[in-house]
Amino acid sequence: MKNNKMYISESIEYIGVDDKNIDLFESQYVLPNGISYNSYLIKDEKYVIMDTVDKRKTDEWLENLEEALSGRKPDYLVVSHLEPDHAYNIELLANKYPDMKIVGNDKTFAFIPQFFNIQNLNERKIVVKEGDELNIGKHVLQFFMAPMVHWPEVMVTYEKTEKILFSADGFGTFGTIDTDEKWIEEARRYYINIVGKYGMQVQALLKKASTLDIKMICPLHGPVLKENLEYYIEKYNVWSSYKPEEEGVLIAYASIHGNTKEVAKKLADILKQKDIKNVVLTDLARDDMSIAIENAFRYDKMVLASSSYNFEVFPPMDNFLRQLKGKNYQNRKIGIIENGTWAPTAGKCIKEVLDSMKDLTICEPIVTVRSRLNEETEKCLETLANNLL
């Protein structure tokens, strides 16, 4: 079962599984390359299972676990996170190994009965608090609370002997273990969309992590990180502090019949002529919304271009704005373009939502298009482009 990509150490074995047939993560995020559910077994005087997996892969995971146990019975199950893609098999495991103790925090055990019916849970549970340790032989597990990264019961575990951080959903990615792509390509989309709202809590966790000597990071999704850990930690620091990662402009448009799209494309041409390095267009009615959200956080500027609709804003733009707000979008420069044949209302609606967010600079002018691109509109776009610089 061992493979080079997921070899942890002589004492710690990867027992997770890949899911290549799932279409949507959390029933909303497209998974072109599937996803992994990571689980680990620490073998010492005591055997410790670090999390279970989603119900979609129960049988395969149990085979991996039993092979790794080699006839032994596990002594502990550490529950980092109760979301069902990691915790579905807790009850099954508890029934299979009735002497196994379950390790979690107060909130873990407050939530467990909402998901599972575990006999004698009070006698089997080990409640840990911030900084508590569990000695299992040569290895010592230390627990750190990570509330709202991204559920309130989340905790991470630091193995002090081999200096490994079991980071729960932190540092995870979309994609299976054997997906051939750069970590950042799906780590950014994963972080922004799944954890992005909770930047303050991630910053608190990074502060705790900075006190630890970490040699390896074992997340619950995606590859184990063994080298250049400073790179991954710095990306998390940028993302969780809501700083732009790169200079560039995302032009996000919502067009009914194509006229607003043409205006957006014209603005993109103008910006490129001004040597803006990164100019990205996204069609909010057709493109992957999670990628649009990711790019909004990635770049330091954004232009929102929308048709008016029912005296409000076109629904794909409204959805985009609400998601940005829900993920604490901030610290960016924004341009607005509205289109309307008889009653342009999109600009007003967009600005109302933006005004409820933090530290956004709205660039003048708000460009109003009457049906289609014309010479006057192009002059306004030129002015907007200059003010974005």
Image: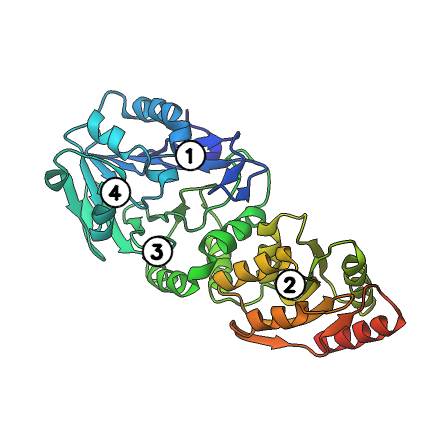
The extreme right residue here reads 375
Q: Nearer the viewer, mark 2 or mark 1?
A: 2
How many neighbours does mark 3 have within 10 angstroms: few (below 14), some (14-19), or many (20 or more)?
Answer: few
Would you place residue 340 above or below residue 216 in this image?
below
Badge 2 density bin: few <14, some 14–19, many ≥20, Cα 10 Å: many
Q: Quadrant of residue 56?
A: top left
Instruction: Specify few, some or many for label 4: CA neighbours under 10 Å numbering under 14, 14-19, or 20 or more.
Output: few
Q: Which mark is residue 114?
A: 4
Front one among 349 and 202:
349
Q: CA distance from mark 3 to mark 2?
A: 50 Å
Tell me the residue that label 1 is attached to. Answer: 7
| Left or right for 123, reference 273 | left
Q: Amino acid at mark 3?
A: Asp
* Earlier residue among tags 1 and 4: 1
Position of the N terminus by quadrant: top left
Image spot of residue 192 (x, y percent): 51, 56
Which amino acid type is marked by label 4? Gln
Q: Position of residue 256 (x, y in %)?
A: 73, 54
The one nearer the camera, 70 or 356, is 356
| Alpha carbon separation for disc pair 4 and 3 | 36 Å
- Identify whether 48 is placed above or below 283: above
Disc 4/disc 2 C-alpha distance (Å):
40 Å
Per the image, label 4 sits on a secondary structure element best described as helix
Residue under numbered circle 2: 313
Residue at position x 45%, y 55% from top? 195
Color encoding of the figure: rainbow
Percent coordinates x, y for residue 310 in the rendering: 66, 61
Which quadrant is the C terminus positioned in? bottom right
Q: Are marks 1 and 3 in contact (CB under 8 Å)?
A: no
* Secondary structure found at label 1: loop
Image depth: mark 3 or mark 2 in front: 2
